[in-house]
Amino acid sequence: MSQTDSPLPRSRAKAARHSLSGSLERMLPRLVIAPSLAVALFFVYGYMLWTFVLSLTDSGMLPQYDFIGFAQYARLFANERWNVAATNLVVFGGLFIILCLFLGLMLAILLDQRIRQEGALRTIYLYPMALSLIVTGVVWRWILNPGLGVESLVRSWGFEDFTFDWLVNPDMAIYALVMAAVWQASGFVMALFLAGLRSIDDNLFKAAALDGASLPKVYWRIVIPCLRPVVFSAVMILAHIAIKSFDLVMALTGGGPGYATDLPATFMYTYTFTRGEIGLGSASAIMMLCGVLAILVPYLYSELRGNKHG
Amino acid sequence: MKTIHALAAGALLAAAVGQAHAAEIEVLHWWTSGGEAKAANMLKQKLEAKGHTWKDFAVAGGGGDSAMTVLKSRAISGNPPAVAQIKGPLIQEWGDMGFLGNIDKIAKEENWDSFLTPQLAAYNKVDGHYAAVPVNIHRINWLWANPDVLEKAGIDDVPKTWDEFFADAKKIREAGFIPLAHGGQPWQDATVFEVVMMGIGGGDFYRKAFVELDPEALTSDTMIESLKTFKKLRSTMDDNIAGRDWNIATSMVINGKAAMQIMGDWAKGEFTAAGLTAGEDYLCEAAPMTEHMFSYNVDSFAMFKIDDEGKQQAQQDLASLILSKDFQTTFNKAKGSIPVRLDVPLDSFDKCAKASRKAFDAASEGNGLVPSLAHGMAVSASVQGAVFDVITNFFNDPEMSAETAAKRLASAVRAAS
């Protein structure tokens, strides 16, 4: 009896050991992730919360906690410069995303035609992404400077009336910013699309050709819809580049002429750090956050739900 | 024998005192360019000769904007440096928040009140106690000119009124030069505007508008006329001003591309570095209509509150060094400004500095001594920023009328203050 009994406790012990190591196994990923999660919660969401709290105070040069409700938001929307910055973000962000997607897709389709030296060309188009935005800004500032760059070059060829003064013209300076940003990022979007195109089965083209579809039609009706997930990632990446654009503005226009090319990020920095208006600056930061959420949440929702069904 | 004993005893005492109070103090400043860096180094050596240690904390960029950002973050974390370069009304703001110490002891000992102008000394006091020490006085309303260019354009003398200026500008343009060198940055726009305004409106008007921020003055006819004159200056500049740094604009005057520039006297450093002599190779005159005005920009070092007695002693020693006649002379020569001490002789200074002192004396006797708004001496940073926004936008927007700009100025100032 004792002999037959003996295996039982042993197996029980084994089972206990098993469950211990099993629970450890289950716990381990959580344990490993916990510190980084805590750090992220604290430094990202904690500070978001703090910024929101500050935006409800009349903090000046240093944070203080005299709550004044939403008065800073009222001041923000009465602020002429904020309206310019917000409008600029819509113009800049919209044009930047659309142009990058369009150019990136075109370049990717053309590069996908099994041409020679594709690797070299791909590198050339992708290279601007390797530059710091500060470098891009400085280079484009020189190119667009009427006295140094394109305008003076064309004039020296004999076209005396040629003007290309986007950088110094308050109405056009924001487009100069778009130009530099598109130059920087469209190669990267091209790489994304190229990867997407490569994953499309060749047989699809052949089948479509058999059915008598022309090549543009194949791309328009079949290939581009297949690239939808790539468009999704590209928009995500481009949107956050657009919203956090700070260094490009600083290097290319410094927010000028006047404050014609101010974006919310430069507005926030100026008010919070150089003008000693932490309350107003925090309010603008929270408005930026709201703007991002207003665009991204519906988009994420529709895309992710669509994927589940598909 | 007696003297040797006395000397030895003195030396021993000094060593003992030095040891008892030697301390390391951290000094935040933005003196990082050529001549300024040299001056900071000189101050450091003198402080170390007294047995203290100078921990350098230089933050370059933005005319002190970056340094202020760093200072704020250090102060919030409860660890401010012992000494920091702060100027104008900002010293009061820091003092009101209870961050600054008290250096009355050394101020009384050396009798600062006897050689500092009361108007300037007031910036460095919090509740009547000295908390900071002024270093230099810059004059803003200067017109720098290249005499060769003026001669080629057939102009004998630097313009004294704005009418003369615009007439001369036409001649200069016809001779193939740029009449006025300028950089299109908000603070430079504001610098030129305040010089125009103080010329047209005079000292009392300037103080009403830019110190008291009186809405009536801000929308008055005088203001509108000043704005119109300022906007007209745009036509005397070249097309490539966007974002240009002030020293590039100065170099245009040096190279003979442009005839004149309106800028504070730190511009002198550029002329000196190019090997030019004041009064011969370049001219320094009061900007049109501002002969009796002196708009000042004064740098100061503020002393932060610390408990350590050794560090307090080091702060006082540093303050005393900064105001020593020796340092005042060397430093201000390098910086282009004039000494804050009115009892320092200017014999070894150049013509422009002598003219600056003369203008200072005349202006403080009359009512022409005014704080520069463009350089943070007149109002808080937020009001200053609001004024910059309106001025620079008006200057760059061909459509905006002076009347609209004046109204916007008043409403922006009200919103910011």
Image (cartoon, coloured by chain):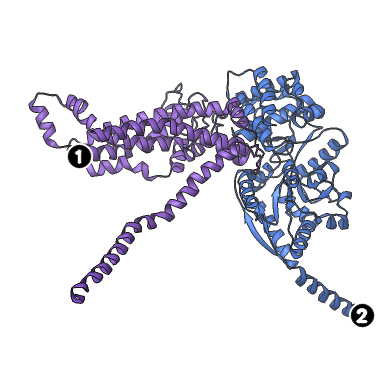
Q: Nearer the viewer, residue B75 or B180?
A: B75
Label disc, if present, on residue A198 of the rendered structure? 1
The chain letter under disc 2 is: B
Check disc 2: other Cα within 10 Å, few if <14, some if 14-19, many if 20+. Answer: few
Label 1: which secondary element:
helix
Q: Nearer the viewer, residue B238 or B47?
A: B47
The chain letter under disc 1 is: A
Tell me the quadrant of the picture where the N terminus of chain A can be found: bottom left
x, y percentage for residue B327? 76, 56
Tell me: B87 left or right of A280: right
x, y percentage for residue B301? 73, 51
Q: Residue flagged by tag 1: what amino acid is it?
A: Arg
Q: Quadrant of residue B42?
A: bottom right
Q: Residue flagged by tag 2: what amino acid is it?
A: Lys
Q: Colour of chain A?
A: purple
- Image position of A274 with respect to B50: above or below: above
- Image position of B291 with respect to B355: above or below: above
Tell me the quadrant of the picture where the C terminus of chain A can be found: top left
Chain assigned blue: B
Q: Is residue A59 visible?
A: yes
Q: Are marks 1 and 2 on the same chain?
A: no
Q: Quadrant of residue B355?
A: top right
Check disc 1: other Cα within 10 Å, few if <14, some if 14-19, many if 20+. Answer: few
Q: Residue at x 26, y 41 (%)?
A: A121
- Determine which residue is flagged by label 2: B2
